[in-house]
Image (cartoon, coloured by chain):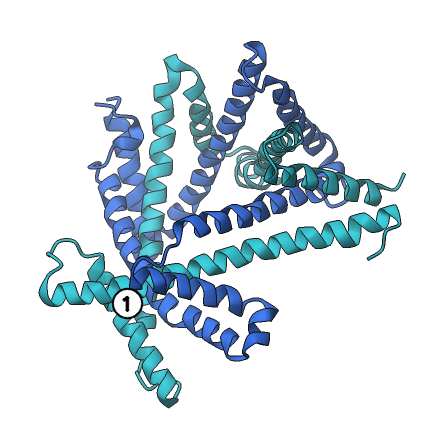
Chain colours: A blue, B cyan
Amino acid sequence: MRLVIPLAITFVAGMIMILQFFVPATQSVGESLQEWYMIVASAAIFLGAINLLNVHVHKIRFKAPNWKYSPVTIAGFSVMIITGIFFGIEPGKPFDYMFTQMMVPMGATMFSLLAFFVASAAFRAFRASNWRATLLLLSAFIVMLGRVPIGGMISPKIPLISEWIMQVPNLAGQRAVMIGAAMGMVATSLRMIFGIERSYLGGAD
Amino acid sequence: MNWTVIGIWLGALLSLSLYSFLYKDNPFYKFAEHLFVGMSAGYWVIYNIKNVLIPNWWNNLVPAEGGMQPIWLIPGALAFFMLLRIVPKLSSLSRMSLSLIVGTGAGLSMTAMLQTNALAQVNGTIIALGQGGGLLSWISNIIIVTGVVCGLVYFFFSKAHTGVVGGAANVGITVLMVAFGASFGYTVMARISLLIGQTQFLLFEWLPTMGINL
């Protein structure tokens, strides 16, 4: 029973979502199920938050390496929760202030840091070892050059070539990947709905 | 107290702390990193309560017009079961919640992916070769059609890549290499544009608060 009930839920939920696409009469059930899905999936965020707090409390208690920074995480978490609950999340409130003045710059900085690491990784990994690797290198170089003013200054054709690479060979490659991934997704979804793929149940038998 | 200036200083100091990682791992970076993680978790919890749970669950369970809809206790119970994952003795109950998520997600993504990522892309590839006019359009359209077909052949592993299939797969790899290169270049430039944005913030918003105008 420990396996039958979860598998039955997966099957029924999956079939309703597929049926609602083809049978208009089942659309309202499908829409309700989508709301249920959002509600249940949202619990995963709480689970993540509880786990995060757990990890940091554990680090403080056992004085694990870098435990001195754990109170910072807990404080940051608590401040956002308290301000969000007691003052609301509307623009101009403390919650929104901390989001725009602290989280947004930190998020942008974190992602911009990746520019350095991606560039250094590329420098080490990209080698024109064969003609296909050279093609990859050239394509990346032209696209990068075409997106900065200096590219257009070197030759007005560089931005045009960059755009053509994005619109033609890149489009073809991305489409092939997307179609292949969609086929894989369909196969995996069917395996899950029909109970062939059960790894998400944690190896239950 | 000028909250705008305080906000600029907070953003600037935290950004500089994070950039300090470019030199090496240090306490300033660790402080900002831990703060970012904690604040992000808190932000998503509140966002979830206000934008998912209240409108989708609470407002349906206890509608504004009065009364209670007991059917909405079921998703509430399933959400609660999900949290029981942290209680080892009751963690098996979370399987029911997981099953609902997996089943609905699989059903939803199957139809959606088939429609948008497979059929729409195939539809977009079936183009008249002369569409757009001019020699370049002809060449471009031939490259798109050939590239998609050969790229798919490359991903087809049920037949050995020899003979005609091997030739097509080789063309597919070539197109994929150009596509990966282009995607890489595009991603790097997106990161660079964020870097430029943050540099502009530091130079043209933060420095003027100290009377330094560039």
Query: In the displayed image of the protein, which residue is found farthest to the bottom?
Result: B134
Question: Foreground residue, A197 or B90?
Answer: A197
Quarter occupied by the N terminus of chain B: top right
The residue carrying pointer 1 sits among few (fewer than 14), some (14 to 19) or many (20 or more) residues within 10 Å by Cα, namely many
* Identity of the residue drawn at 49% across and 26% down: A47
Residue type at tag 1: Val
Res A94 quadrant in image: top right
Q: Is residue B75 left or right of residue B11?
A: left
Residue A150 vs B56, above or below: the answer is below
Q: Which residue is mark 1?
A: B148
Up-down relation of residue A41 to residue B112 (above or below): above
Residue B170 screen position, x and y as percent: 21, 64
- Quarter-of-image position of residue A76: top right
Residue at x 30%, y 55% (from the top left corner): A182
Q: Is residue B143 above or below residue B85?
A: below
Question: x, y (%) of residue A204?
Answer: 25, 23
Q: Quick check: can you spot residue A97? A: no
Residue B126 percent location from the top left of the image: 29, 75
Chain ID at mark 1: B
- Relative to A86, is B142 on the left or the right? left
Front one among A65 and A81: A65
